[in-house]
Image (cartoon, grey):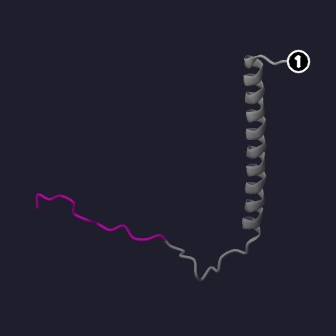
């Protein structure tokens, strides 16, 4: 059976949507595996982690003085 141009366009669009969905699912699974690996990593050494925040510098930005 011969397909019309419109039917070919629709078929190509549906194939693109299916490929896009498949790629999105592969990326989601890859991200999940990566996050699992990150969660399994040991916590950082507390002696090497900066525990307090930095200090705010006070700068005079007025050029009039």
Label 1 sits on a secondary structure element that is loop
* Image: 34 above or below 46: above
Q: Could you tell me which residue is drawn at 77 percent across and 69 percent down?
A: 40
The image quadrant where one finds the C terminus is bottom left
Q: Could you tell me which residue is drawn at 73 percent across and 28 percent down?
A: 13
Residue 51 x/y as whole percent: 54, 74
As drawn, which residue projects farthest toward the left?
A: 65
Q: Magenta stretch: residue 63 in it?
A: yes
Q: Could you tell me which residue is drawn at 26 percent across and 65 percent down?
A: 59
As drawn, which residue projects farthest toward the front?
A: 2
* Image: 20 above or below 39: above
Residue 55 x/y as whole percent: 39, 70
Other-residue count near label 1 (Cα within 10 Å), few / some / many at <14 / 14–19 / ≥20: few
Magenta span: predominant SS is: loop
Image check: 58 left or right of 3? Answer: left
* Image: 28 above or below 40: above
Look at the image and give the residue range highlighted in magenta. Answer: 53-65
Mark 1 highlights which residue?
A: 1
* Image: 19 above or below 26: above
């Amino acid at each position: 059976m011969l397909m019309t141009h419109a039917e070919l366009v629709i078929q190509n669009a549906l194939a693109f949507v299916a490929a896009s969905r498949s790629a999105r699912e592969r990326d989601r699974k890859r991200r999940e595996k990566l996050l699992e690996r990150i969660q399994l990593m040991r916590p950082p050494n507390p002696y090497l982690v900066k525990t307090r925040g930095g200090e705010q510098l006070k700068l005079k930005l007025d050029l009039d003085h």
